[in-house]
Image (spheres, rainbow, N blue to C red):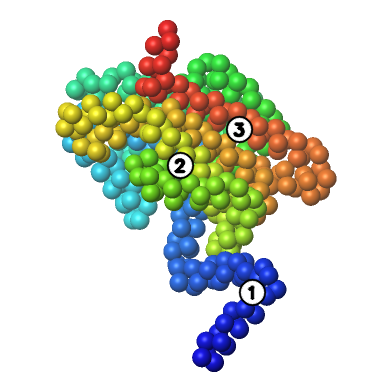
Amino acid sequence: MSVVLGWLSSVIDWFLPFPPRLPIGEGFEALNEWLKTNFGAVFEGIGAVIDWSVTTLREFLVEPQAAQLTAIAVAVLAVVLVRVHLIPVLVIAATTVALYIGQAAFELGNTIINHSPPQLFLWAMALFGQDGVEANLVIGIVALAALVGVAAVNRTRLATVGVVAGGWLATILCGWLLFGALPEVIGQPTATLMMLLLSALAWAVAGWKLGVFSLVALTVVISIEQWDNAMSTLSLVLVASLIAVVVAIPIGVLAAYSTVVSRIVKPVLDLMQTMPAFVYLIPAIFFFSLGAVPGVVATVIFAMPPGVRLTELGIRQIDRELVEAGEAFGAPTGKILTGIQLPLALSTIMAGVNQVIMLGLSMVVIAGMVGAGGLGNQVYQGISRNDGALGFEGGIAVVILAIFLDRLTAAVTRRSPQARAEHAAAA
C-alpha cells in the first residue's frame, strides 16, 4: 500500500503546478541524436547523393558540355524509340552505358580512340579548333547515330527523331559559333548558349510567347551578372522538387485508395504546412551540416504537401463510372491506375507539381542562410550588408525564374488529356 501511495504522490507532484512542463523539445533532440547515432551512414549517403545531384546539374546549367548535350539527346531518342524497337534500343543503351562506365573507370574510350585511324578525328579537330578528342562525346555521337539509323531503317518516328537530332546538331553548331567564331561579340558564351536552350524549351512546350519572354528575361539575368547564381538556385529547386514529387505522388495515390492512409497523412501534412520554414533547418543542419544539402532537405519537407494533397484530390475526382468500366473489361488495379486514373488526373497532379516548384523557389532565401548559395545567398547578403542593389538584383532573378517555371508547368497541364477533352467539350 505504501508503494502505491508513493507512486500516486510522485504522479501528483509531477502534475503540480498544473499544467506540467512537457519535455517535447528535449525529446525531439534526443530522437535526432538517436537517429544520427544509429543511422549516420544512411544520412551521409543521402547527403552525398543530393550534393552530387545538385553539383552536377549546376555545372551543366552553368557550363554545358557537348558530351552532356549529346548524352541528353541519346536519352531522349532512346525513350522515343524504346516502345517501337525494344531490343535494338536496349542493346544500344546497354552498350553506351557500358562504354561510359568503362571510360570513367578505365579510360576505355581513350584506348579505343588511340587505336582507331586518326583520319576519323583529325578533320573534326581542325574544324572545331580542338587539341584533343573527348571520348565521352565520341561515345555519345556513335550512340546517337545508331539510334537515328534504327529509326531510319524502320521508318518510324522520323519526324521526332529528326527534331531531336537536328536540335542537337543546331545546339553543337551554335556552341561552336558562340565560342569560336564570335568570341569578342558574345561576352558570356556559356550563359548565352544555355539561355538559348531554355528559351527554345519554353517555345517548344508553351509556345512562342513564353519563348520570347524567356529570351528577354533570361538575358536580363545575364546582364545583371546573376546567371551563375540563378542556375545554382534552379539546380537546387529542380533537385528538391524532383525528390518531393517522387515521394508525394505515391503517398497521394495511397491516400486516394485508402481512407485510413488519408486520415493518417492529413494531420502530418497540416503540420508540415503550418510549421515555420526556419524550423526545418534545425534537423537538416544537424544531420547534414551546412551547404546545399540541408537547403534541399528543408525545401523538400516544406514543398511536398501540395503534391500529396492534389494527387489524392485528382484521383478521387475521377468519375467512378470510368473506373467501373475498366473493371468490367477485366483490367487489374495497376492498369486502371496507370491507364485511366493518372492520365485523367494529370492536370490536377501537375497543378500540385507547379505548387511544389513554387514553394521550393520560395525557400531559396532561407536555404541561402545555411550556405546553399545561389540567389538566396545574394538576397541574404543584401540584407546583411544593407546593400539594396544586390538584394534587388537577386530578387528580380528569383521572380524571373518563378515566372519561367510557373508558365512552363502550366503549359504541361494544359496539354494533359483531361484538359484537352475539357477544351474540346467547351468548344
Q: Residue at x 26, y 33 (%)?
A: 336
Q: What's under tag 2, amino acid-wise?
A: Val
Give SS at disc 1.
Answer: helix
Q: Which residue is mark 1?
A: 15
Residue 185's image quarter? top right
Q: What's under tag 1, amino acid-wise?
A: Phe
Q: Is residue 353 left or right of residue 251?
A: right
Q: What's under tag 3, amino acid-wise?
A: Leu
Q: Residues within 10 Å of mark 2 (few under 14, many from 20)?
A: many
What mark, if any, has residue 408 been given in the picture?
A: none
Mark 3 or mark 2: name the one nearer the start of the chain. 2
Q: Is residue 246 left or right of residue 233?
A: left
- Residue 79 makes an appearance in the image: yes
Name the outermost residue toward the left: 330
Give SS at disc 2.
Answer: helix
The one nearer the camera, 325 or 338, is 325
